[in-house]
Amino acid sequence: MAVRATVSRFPIDADAREGSGLLWGVTVAPFAAADENGQSPAYGSGGDLLPRCENCWAYFNTYCELEQWSWSCSLCGNLNGLSSNAIERYSRPQSCAEMMSSFVDLELPQEESDAAALQACPVYVAAVDLSSSEEFLELTKSALLAALEALAPGSLFGLATFSHKLGLYDVQGPIPVVKNVFIPPDAEGSLTVELEDVMPLLQFLAPVDTCKDRIASTLETLRPTTSWERTAGAGQGLDGVLLGGRGFGVAMEALCSYLGSEYGNTFALARIFAFLSGPPDYGAGQLDTRRYGEQYASKGEDADRALLPEQTPFYKDLAAVAVQVGVCVDIFAVTNEYTDLASLKFLSIESGGSLFFYTSTEDSTLPQDMYRMLSRPYAFGCVLRLRTSTEFKPGNSYGHFFPDPQYENVQHVICCDSYATYAYDFMFENNIGFSRSKSDVPTLQIAFQYSVVVPPQELSSSGGVSTSRTKHHSLQRRLRIRTVQFGVAQDIHELYDSCDPEVVLSLLVHKVILASLEEGVREGRLLLQEWLVILAAQYNDAYKLVQYSNGSSTRSQIDVAFSQCPQLQPLPRLIFALLRNPLLRFHEEGVHPDYRIYLQCLFSALEPSSLHRAVYPVLTSYATPDKQAYPRHSLSRAALLTSGSPIFFLDAFTVLIVFYSSTADPTLPFPPPHDCLLRTTINILKKERSITPKLIFIRGGHDDASVFENFLIEEQDVDGSGLTSVMGFVSFLEDITQKVLEFIK
């Protein structure tokens, strides 16, 4: 569980927080294998025996004062009695994890029964769009074959297809059988028959261990629905116009209810992989994609605002149903037509799933992403709770979760992998703030309860004797708790010096995404610039850099590069880069609304270091493929020219680019050999990524270098006029300087 704060020393009171201009909050990756310093948790059992505070319900931890018969809560100070069992347990401190570490992962008791063995079967259902092309289906088949290789033994797999009808496949017999149910065309309709009556769930769900070959051969039988079939099935309008044929909404609704039926409740994890080749245009949940077009220009509406909110609550409501029955939905959209991901995204992000978006089948990394996603460990049925000491409290929470309808600061996550990151910002409980004495320390406790499937070999007896119990995967419920204490900054300089710019960027991204969704992209951009202006003004005031004698001398003294505080120096570049990012570029600059929504979903789940790369890529230079020259350059053409290096490597998180300059020695091997340092670096980065980055090799003077050059943003104008300006970043700083002056006056 990695926890990173915007400032490692907290502001002493509300005035100090306001006066600094900095954001105050944390990012949390609850299922990360280690903390932010690489330390693993102390593992143990007896999670149900852990004492809890009678006042604030915080868990006992190493920061609590322990006496013979009682303990004082490190969050609220309440004195709690100890049970006789706890007294005996803590008389041997080396025997229990919570006495040895403030970061623990404890097993919770689980009932042992045949039902529990069935529960441990993870269930995966592929829902494939047949209102698609041959190319789309070939790509989907490759992705599902990769998925079958990655799935753990003991998993159950179901194959469904959708168009104007929903097909369920029985792959357990010698010949695959498909049973179809027609989807009603009207927007209010639902299936007239329960899927359980069409095919019993346990007939539909096949064990991957024994049926992998049959599933693979069934995939080969998938064919796109012909336009004739769709016309006949979907019916035509009065004027003979085809009504459509992609009944995605009804298919998802039916599958969620199918998996949440009487059998479904016994499955530990149910995941639906939805492969979509275009917008749902048939039956309930159909979307009107005509809203993406020229009509907004004629209506005088702001396209950047109009295309961001959802047009129907259907998928948000369906996400609530999915959460209730414990189904996680991953959406893989492979399409270059407007699909309105703004409406569809809720189904994936609120159920703990992912939204993947590929604009073409040719260079899509879908099979690699599928394999990568299923190969890494993940937790499910998760509950996340953040508690703080009494002086402050969580304000907003951000991330792909479902908030508990009853309890504050409790989030439900159906499926959570080691990369999933959530963010919180803080506010003071009152005007007093933190004590200036050392007795009260700002304390944070994150509790994460989750389940994992444990393979049989981890449970088998030491003698290696196979019993009936060890044949099954088993379900393990665990409780992970991290208690963190922070210092308090005694003055504004200490506060600035303890800043972590990557975490500040994370919180800013969450805030501008929210502002964009509510007020439009323009508002998101304004919010970002205003924040930097206020921060720069407060910093200049704190360092007494502003001279009030006359206007001209004031301007010359203003420092918007934060030259006296190294921790703040990356921020102007990060803000500049974020303003250049498609996330906040204007619609008229050619940013596709679906791509913007995809970036919102991606960026709001990334941990801070990955987000940093996605917003402001890392540019490294090499003297040869085996020798690094400089570890970091600014993203400017000037940096390339002055470095004199022949090879550059750019890591933009989703894209990795190796660029050989046009002046590079022709004897240098291109592309770099597989056993060189540069390739090794690339392989390590690819392995660590949550998604598969595209790798591009460019030879300056021979290949089109525009992909690489587009990342050299510092000489580009940030206003979004599209015209490149030699003074991009420099003129941005001048503009901020002018705005700081106006703010101070």
Image (cartoon, grey):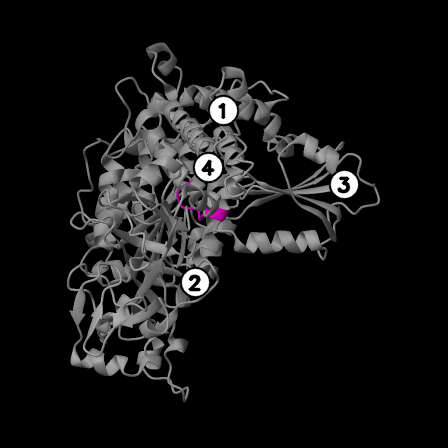
**Image mark count:** 4
Q: In 3D space, how far apart are the residues under numbered discs 3 and 2 (Cα atoms)?
A: 38 Å
Q: In 3D space, how far apart are the residues under numbered discs 3 and 4 (Cα atoms)?
A: 43 Å
Q: In 3D space, how far apart are the residues under numbered discs 1 and 4 (Cα atoms)?
A: 67 Å
The residue wearing badge 1 is: 547
The residue wearing badge 2 is: 33
Mark earlier in primary sequence (3, 2): 2
Residue type, label 4: Ser
Magenta-tinted stretch = 602-609
Q: Can residue 288 be seen here?
A: no
SS assignment at label 4:
loop
Q: In 3D space, how far apart are the residues under numbered discs 2 and 1 (Cα atoms)?
A: 51 Å
Q: Which mark is residue 412?
A: none
At 67% from the left and 53% from the top, the residue drawn is: 679
Mark earlier in primary sequence (1, 4): 4
The residue wearing badge 4 is: 133
Task: Please indicate whether residue 612 sits to the left or right of residue 668 in the image.
Answer: left
Mark earlier in primary sequence (2, 1): 2
Give 389 or 129, whichever is nearer the viewer: 389
Query: Residue 434, how many percent across, how many down?
Result: 29, 50
> Which is in the foreground here, disc 3 or disc 4?
3
42 magenta-colored: no
